[in-house]
Structure formats: C-alpha cells, structure tokens
C-alpha cells in the first residue's frame, strides 16, 4: 500500500490552514501593501518545484507555493474584512514595505 497520496492530502490540508493564519497575521502586523513579497515567494516555490526531480517533494513545494500565491491575493480582502469589523484592527502604525511607491502604482490582486 502506498501512503503518498494520503500524506500529500494531509499536507495540503495543513498548509491551507496555515495560509489562513499567516494572511490574518500579516495583514494585522504589516498591512496589505506587503502583498508582492509573499506572491514572489510563492512564485519562486512553484518554479523550484519544477526543477526538483522527486515527485513527492516537488508536489509539496508546488502546493506550498500555490498557497502563498493565494494568500498574497487575500491580503487586500483581509484588510476589507478588518475594515468591516470582522477582524481586529492593529492600533499601532504598520511599517511601510520596501518599494512602496512602486507597489502603490499596481492594483492589489484578488481572485
């Protein structure tokens, strides 16, 4: 019996759950304007999954990268949910991301 499929399914479940957590925390502490950085990290993970010869590790890296890409698109949505009062707002000022002027020119992605 091969348990690889079950392991990938459980890992996917875990990484998606972690995605909800980090999106909420990142928007709370940093703000949604940091969205390009997890998006770039996710894209690098997906590209990395294309060059790994082992199918299992490649799948784990691809699933993680896709979760980070999704999370980057959810940061703006999370800011809207916080504005609606569904989540707490951070009363402290949020740090500005590097390249803020360039990031402000690009519309934040959403699915």
Image: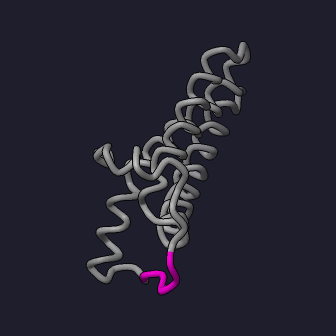
Q: Is residue 89 above or below residue 94?
A: below
Q: Position of residue 66 (x, y in %)?
A: 50, 37
**Which of the 4 image quarters holds residue 75?**
bottom left
Quadrant assignment, res 95: bottom right
Q: Residue at x 54, y 45 (%)?
A: 37
Q: Is residue 39 above or below residue 19?
A: above
- Which range of residues does the magenta coloring cover? 89-93
- Residue 57, quarter of the rendered image: top right
Per the picture, the main secondary structure of the magenta-coloured stretch is loop
Q: Nearer the viewer, residue 44 or 11?
A: 44
Q: How many marks?
A: 0
Quarter of the C terminus within the rendering: top left
Percent coordinates x, y for residue 23 in the rendering: 49, 60
Q: Nearer the viewer, residue 76 or 11?
A: 76
What sort of colour scheme is used for the picture?
one colour
Q: Residue at x 55, y 51 (%)?
A: 98
Q: Nearer the viewer, residue 15 or 22?
A: 22
Q: Residue furthest bottom?
A: 91
- Position of 40 with respect to 2 (left or right) is left
Point out residue 45 in the picture as x, y percentages from the top left corner. Answer: 61, 31
Asked if 78 appears above or below 15 in the picture, the reply is below
Q: In the rendered view, does 84 fall on the left or right side of 95? A: left
Q: Quadrant of the N terminus?
A: top right
Query: In the image, is 76 to the left or to the right of 30?
Result: left
Image spot of residue 26 (x, y percent): 53, 64
Q: Is residue 4 magenta?
A: no
Residue drawn at x 49%, y 54% is 34
């Amino acid at each position: 019996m091969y348990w690889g499929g079950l392991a990938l399914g459980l890992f996917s479940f875990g990484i998606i759950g972690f995605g909800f957590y980090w999106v909420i925390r990142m928007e709370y502490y940093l703000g949604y304007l940091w969205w390009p950085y997890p998006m770039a990290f996710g894209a690098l993970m997906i590209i990395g999954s294309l060059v790994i010869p082992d199918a299992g590790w490649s799948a784990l890296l691809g699933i993680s990268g896709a979760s980070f890409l999704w999370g980057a698109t959810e940061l703006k949505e999370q800011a809207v949910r916080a504005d609606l009062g569904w989540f707490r707002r951070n009363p402290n000022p949020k740090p500005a991301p590097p390249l803020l002027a360039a990031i402000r020119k690009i519309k934040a992605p959403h699915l």
